Amino acid sequence: MATSPYLGRVNFDAAQHASQEGVDVFQSLVYANNLAHGCDSSPQVLANWLLGSTNAPNIAPPDASFVELDRKGPIAVRLAPDRSLTIRYRLRGFVSGGSTTFALAIHDPSVAPGTDPSVTFRQAVALASTAATSDGWFGEDVITIGAGELVSRSRPTLDIAGGDAAVARFHEVYVTVLASNATAATATLTGVYAAAYVGL
């Protein structure tokens, strides 16, 4: 949920910020509000890695089914006020020939990653194809997991630094990348970027 009291940024006229001008209580509250809103609106990066082609995961032909190339998680995520999760992503890689379809799945730990983008319960799946024979980014877009679909989980934590143990509830996801290779080509995954946005 939003942590900014005014549920958004409050702008000042530039003339109100004169040099050496005192700051009253209301201005202090607005500054704190704007800082909190900036934190609410900032991306939470779930995956951000880049490899050279030598050590990158790949899939050789022939394999028409989707094969898992990389998985990160579980990752505790912040949800939007309606309890949905919106992710901006892009993939990086290349093929030795032909074309390959990659699938990025952001999914709850309770479900196996699907490769059909019409299957959205507790996950979001994006398909992106490339025929590039040189390494590069492709398939940049936005996907969303519906409101209330992620399962909350209990995890032990501390109530304060050095304090007593307490139980908190988290929402977690995995970031999984798969590839389907039905042509005579080797598909190589060299990078993944996925960031969750909580902005209002």
Image (cartoon, helix red, strand yellow):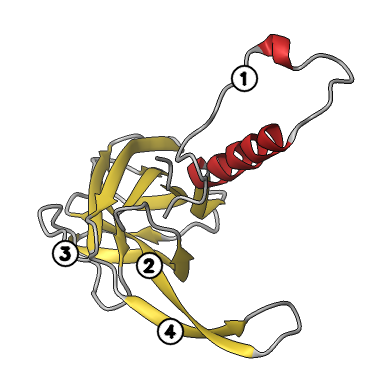
105 over 97 or under it: above or below: below
Residue occupying image coordinates x 63% and y 13%: 13
Q: Which structural element holds mark 3? A: loop
Mark 2 or 1: in front is 1
Q: Residues within 10 Å of mark 2 (few under 14, many from 20)?
A: many
Mark 4 or 2: in front is 4
Q: Amino acid at mark 1?
A: Phe
**Structural distance between the alpha carbons of marks 2 and 1:** 39 Å
Q: Quadrant of the C terminus?
A: top left
Lower position in the chain sequence, tag 4 or tag 2:
4
The residue where tag 4 is placed is 154
Mark 4 and mark 1 in contact? Answer it, CB < 8 Å. no
Mark 1 or 3: in front is 1
Q: Which structural element holds mark 1? A: loop
Q: Which structural element holds mark 4? A: strand
Whether residue 133 is visible to the viewer of this picture, yes or no, is no
Relative placement, left or right, of 156 versus 1 is: right
The residue where tag 3 is placed is 121
Lower position in the chain sequence, tag 2 or tag 3:
3
Q: Which structural element holds mark 2? A: strand
Q: Residues within 10 Å of mark 4 (few under 14, many from 20)?
A: few
